[in-house]
Image (cartoon, rainbow, N blue to C red):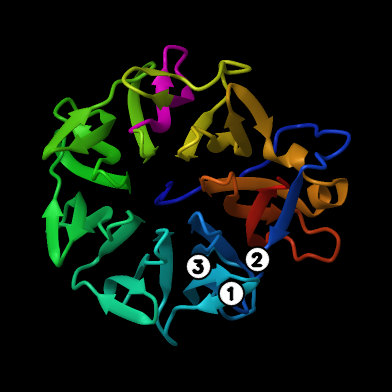
Amino acid sequence: MLKRFAICLLGALAGSALAASPNWSFATLGTLGGNVSWATGINNAGEVVGWSGTVRGEFTETDPEYHAFAYGNGRMRDLGRAGDNSSAWAINDRGAIAGLSHAEGVWIVGGATAKTLGFQGTPYDINQFGVIAGTYDAGGEFRAFTHRGGILSELGTLGGGWSHAEAINDRGVVVGSSVNAAGMVRGFVHERGRMRELGTLGGPHSQAFDVNERGVVVGSAGNDSNGVQAFIHDGVMRALFPMPRPQDVSEAHAINNRNQVVGTLNDAGFLWDNGKLTMLRDLLTPAEQLAWGVLTPLDINDRGWIVGVASSEGVNGIPGGSRRAFILKPKR
């Protein structure tokens, strides 16, 4: 599951389909009262987590206050506390949610029980056994970690000063990125106590963003045209799809167990499925395309349900610059 420090929403690709696919449904999830919400994770039951502004006012990336939320059965539930900014990043199929607050640090919610884990960091993923992976401040250096059974384990680096974990599967395989001894940022896979470096597509850097239960990794890597390109790695790193132009930029954000991949091409969301590339905007109706100009997908479950952030263009009565958590579902 993609769990990024920051995501840039700059614009959509020029042009759109003449008619939307009749096989998909699109909905925004609302907010907790503010102008913005982000969906960061979804499980196979269709439960969604993320964060939302709580106070309506002039738009900022965070609103005056923002809270973690869980969404299910058509209702957004506030997981935060008054006066404390919080966010939820991942949910597993047992309904356990990993998140953080400014005041209390990393926490986990299971059913009606919330537990603070006692350290500051960002928990970007949680597997079915409740093992959390993410990044924390280890004395001034950001380091990848796992947390299981009350034990915080630092995963080390590739030889440089920092590491950052993005995702973990049920076998405990963790992926992310780290600086190596040569000062290059490279994607990594950590398993059986060892961190190994992923390569690139010919450029200097790479980042791994997600891993499925088969151990297939996705992310982005520098290519030999001095660009950034989405990759898939199942023992060998290869480009997910050919780049339309050398200056284009693509990133693969998340992969499910059917090897469906979501990400962005020039900041516009895509779905890659069995070798076919579909831009998410082309799955919307003309009215939805007009209202929500940019879709940035952040996760996909095994049913093919996609969640992320939709950006408005300030038309159809929707305030300009609004961001809303969205869910895009195939009708099958």
The label shown at residue 290 is none
Quick check: 2 left or right of 286?
left
Looking at marks 3 and 1 on the same chain, the residue that comes earlier in the sequence is marked by 3
Q: Residue furthest bottom?
A: 82
Task: Look at mark 2 in the image and give the residue it sits on.
Answer: 29
Q: Quadrant of residue 185?
A: top left
The front one of 193 and 51 is 193
Q: Are marks 2 and 1 in contact (CB under 8 Å)?
A: yes
- Whether residue 8 can be seen here: no
What's the magenta region? Answer: 215-231
Task: Look at mark 3 in the image and give the residue it sits on.
Answer: 51
Task: Look at mark 1 in the image and give the residue it sits on.
Answer: 76
> Please, what is the three-letter code of the amino acid marked with disc 2?
Leu
Report the magenta stretch's main SS: strand
- Marks 2 and 1, how far apart at CA: 7 Å
Looking at marks 2 and 1 on the same chain, the residue that comes earlier in the sequence is marked by 2
Q: Quadrant of residue 81?
A: bottom left
Q: Is residue 131 magenta?
A: no
Percent x, y of residue 130: 28, 61
> Residue at image x 44%, y 17%?
226
Looking at marks 2 and 3 on the same chain, the residue that comes earlier in the sequence is marked by 2
The front one of 258 and 77 is 258
Mark 1, residues whose alpha carbon is within 10 Å: few (<14), some, or many (≥20)? some
> Please, what is the three-letter code of the amino acid marked with disc 1?
Met
Q: Quadrant of residue 327?
A: bottom right
> Please, what is the three-letter code of the amino acid marked with disc 3?
Trp
Callout 1: SS = strand
Q: Are marks 3 and 1 in contact (CB under 8 Å)?
A: no
Callout 3: SS = strand
Mark 2, residues whose alpha carbon is within 10 Å: few (<14), some, or many (≥20)? many
Quick check: 209 left or right of 241?
left
